[in-house]
């Protein structure tokens, strides 16, 4: 298949935005795959700020980062992503080049604990305020469960209202696949 699948496409977008020495955000660290990817991408002179409300997610991510010797390049917050403007030090506001969200629940975790549309939208708004121009936010939307469908609809309604002078918004989705495959919404700050 020549069309990029969802997760490789998400990474290709981050590759456009995040370079060595940059500041990045993993708004939903989960099991740490994207956090590790971003930490390797920014290198020793960059930094990643990661957020998750679940202790298990923070522990899984910390372990993964330690195993790959990049833990020092990451600050993990056991907190909701909608607190990022408060948690991320002000001296890096205006320097964040990329961010990723994986919306839904923690793979292998409690499926009753899910991301919520209100906090996700607040986090995106905060990122748009503190990112560099041409910074990219990638939202991978998993909507194959009832709460995911609610969040999908709210996020899509919200991003459709972002002024085109503030950001470009892209939706990348395979439309002929069964079982509600995830899709991407990407936001590039202008």
Image (cartoon, rainbow, N blue to C red):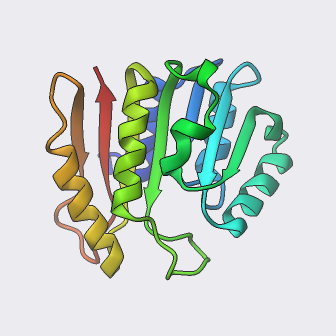
Quadrant for the C terminus in the image: top left
The correct choice, above or below, for 144 with respect to 81 in the image is: below
Taking the spot 38% from the left edge, 47% from the top edge, the residue there is 122
Residue 23 in view, yes or no? yes
Q: How many numbered discs sit on the rendered protein?
A: 0
The correct choice, above or below, for 177 with respect to 32 in the image is: below
Taking the spot 48% from the left edge, 31% from the top edge, the residue there is 98
Between 174 and 41, the one lying in front of the other is 41
Residue 20 point in image, percent of width and height: 63, 19
Q: Decide if residue 125 is on the left or right side of residue 43.
A: left
Name which quarter of the figure residue 156 lies in: bottom left
Residue 120 point in image, percent of width and height: 39, 54
Name which quarter of the figure residue 17 lies in: top left
The correct choice, above or below, for 132 with respect to 128 in the image is: above
Residue 80 point in image, percent of width and height: 55, 56
Residue 70 point in image, percent of width and height: 79, 38
Q: Decide if residue 148 is on the left or right side of residue 110.
A: left
Between 93 and 86, the one lying in front of the other is 86
Between 148 and 129, the one lying in front of the other is 129
Taking the spot 53% from the left edge, 22% from the top edge, the residue there is 93
The correct choice, above or below, for 29 with respect to 4 in the image is: below
Q: Decide if residue 113 is on the left or right side of residue 140.
A: right
Residue 5 in view, yes or no? no
Taking the spot 56% from the left edge, 71% from the top edge, the residue there is 107
Between 87 and 14, the one lying in front of the other is 87
């Amino acid at each position: 298949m020549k069309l990029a699948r969802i997760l490789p496409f998400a990474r290709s977008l981050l590759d456009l935005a995040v370079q060595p020495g940059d500041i990045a955000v993993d708004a939903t660290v989960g099991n740490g795959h994207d956090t590790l990817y971003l930490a390797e991408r920014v290198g020793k002179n960059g930094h990643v700020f990661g957020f998750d409300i679940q202790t298990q997610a923070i522990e899984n991510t910390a372990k993964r980062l330690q195993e790959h010797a990049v833990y020092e390049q990451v600050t993990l917050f056991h907190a909701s992503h909608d607190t990022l403007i408060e948690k991320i030090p002000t001296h890096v506001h205006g320097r964040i080049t990329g961010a990723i969200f994986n919306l839904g629940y923690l793979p292998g975790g409690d499926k009753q604990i899910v991301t919520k549309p209100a906090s996700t939208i607040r986090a995106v708004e905060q990122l748009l305020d503190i990112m560099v121009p041409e910074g990219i936010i990638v939202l991978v939307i998993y909507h194959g469960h009832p709460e995911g469908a609610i969040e999908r609809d709210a996020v899509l309604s919200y991003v459709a209202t972002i002024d085109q002078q503030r950001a470009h918004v892209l939706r990348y989705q395979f439309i002929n696949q069964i079982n509600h495959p995830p899709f991407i919404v990407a936001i590039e700050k202008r």
